[in-house]
């Protein structure tokens, strides 16, 4: 039985009732909190910054999975470690010296993730795959929630899984964007380990039940 990790994306939560939504995740079958940090430069949108993350980590009782959609992420590695991030994911496209960045994340006591945009080829990660704890495959263009899922993602995940096996790496594959009960099973079959779900969870009539259903569907 596969234990697929479900990581609700806080970007889709109700910011006016953030503590309520955090408690909902705490009490649900979700495994992680997925938190997107955007700077308005790397992506055309701005999300929350350090004070909001600090407020979230104060109440969250599960793994904090932080996804940085920012330029020059090296500046903030220690800051995010201090704020309680367990996993810190940087974008391949934003790092000039990816290997060094991954080492710095691990040195700060976090697991190191790398996100790749829809147009980025999976082969570019081959040389560093053994240093990566998690690859976040963007299945929409980063920056905004509620986009349609990009179908090429399945092929990308299958190829990435083959690379991980060939290199004997322990890297997890995370899918971020447009995840629903319509594509979750196929994504897991292709090799996904972690599913990030935003609007699908938070816009549901019963988010707790939706998380439970997603968990059951991908078991």
Image: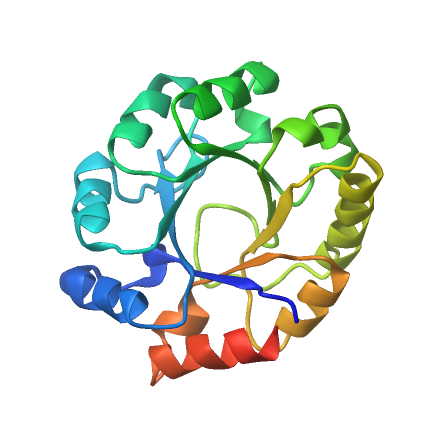
Could you tell me which quadrant the C terminus lies in? bottom right
Can residue 14 be seen in the rendering of this structure?
no
* Numbered disc total: 0
Q: Residue at x 80, y 55 (%)?
A: 155
Q: Residue at x 84, y 39 (%)?
A: 166
What's the coloring here? rainbow
The residue nearer to you, when weighing 119 against 130, is 130
Residue 203 appears at what percent x and percent y? Answer: 36, 75
Q: Residue at x 28, y 38 (%)?
A: 84
15 with respect to 165 (left or right)? left
**Quarter of the image where one finds residue 67:** top left
33 with respect to 152 (left or right)? left
Can residue 202 be seen in the rendering of this structure?
yes
**Quarter of the image where one finds residue 182:** bottom right
The residue nearer to you, when weighing 55 against 156, is 55
Q: Residue at x 33, y 55 (%)?
A: 62
Could you tell me which quadrant the N terminus lies in? bottom right
48 with respect to 190 (left or right)? left
Q: Is residue 159 above or below residue 198?
A: above
Q: Is residue 193 above or below residue 168?
A: below
Residue 180 appears at what percent x and percent y? Answer: 55, 72
The residue nearer to you, when weighing 174 against 41, is 174
Residue 216 appears at what percent x and percent y? Answer: 55, 79
Residue 10 appears at what percent x and percent y? Answer: 33, 57
């Amino acid at each position: 039985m596969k234990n697929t990790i479900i990581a609700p994306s806080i970007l889709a939560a109700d910011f006016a009732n953030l503590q309520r939504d955090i408690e909902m995740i705490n009490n649900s079958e979700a495994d992680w909190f997925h938190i997107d940090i955007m700077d308005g430069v790397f992506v055309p949108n701005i999300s929350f910054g350090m004070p909001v993350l600090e407020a979230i980590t104060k109440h969250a009782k599960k793994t904090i999975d932080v996804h940085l959609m920012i330029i020059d992420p090296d500046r903030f590695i220690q800051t995010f470690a201090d704020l309680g991030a367990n996993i810190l994911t940087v974008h391949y496209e934003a790092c000039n010296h990816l290997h060094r960045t991954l080492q710095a994340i691990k040195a700060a006591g976090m697991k190191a993730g790398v996100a790749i945009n829809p147009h980025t080829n999976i082969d570019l990660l081959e040389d560093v795959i053994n240093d990566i704890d998690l690859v976040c495959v963007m299945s929409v263009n980063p920056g905004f929630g509620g986009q349609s899922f990009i179908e090429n993602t399945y092929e990308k995940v299958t190829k990435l899984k083959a690379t991980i096996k060939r290199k004997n790496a322990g890297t997890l594959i995370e899918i971020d964007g447009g995840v629903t009960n319509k594509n979750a099973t196929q994504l897991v079959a292709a090799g996904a380990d972690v599913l990030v779900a935003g609007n699908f969870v938070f816009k549901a009539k019963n988010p707790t039940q939706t998380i439970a259903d997603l968990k059951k569907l991908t078991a």
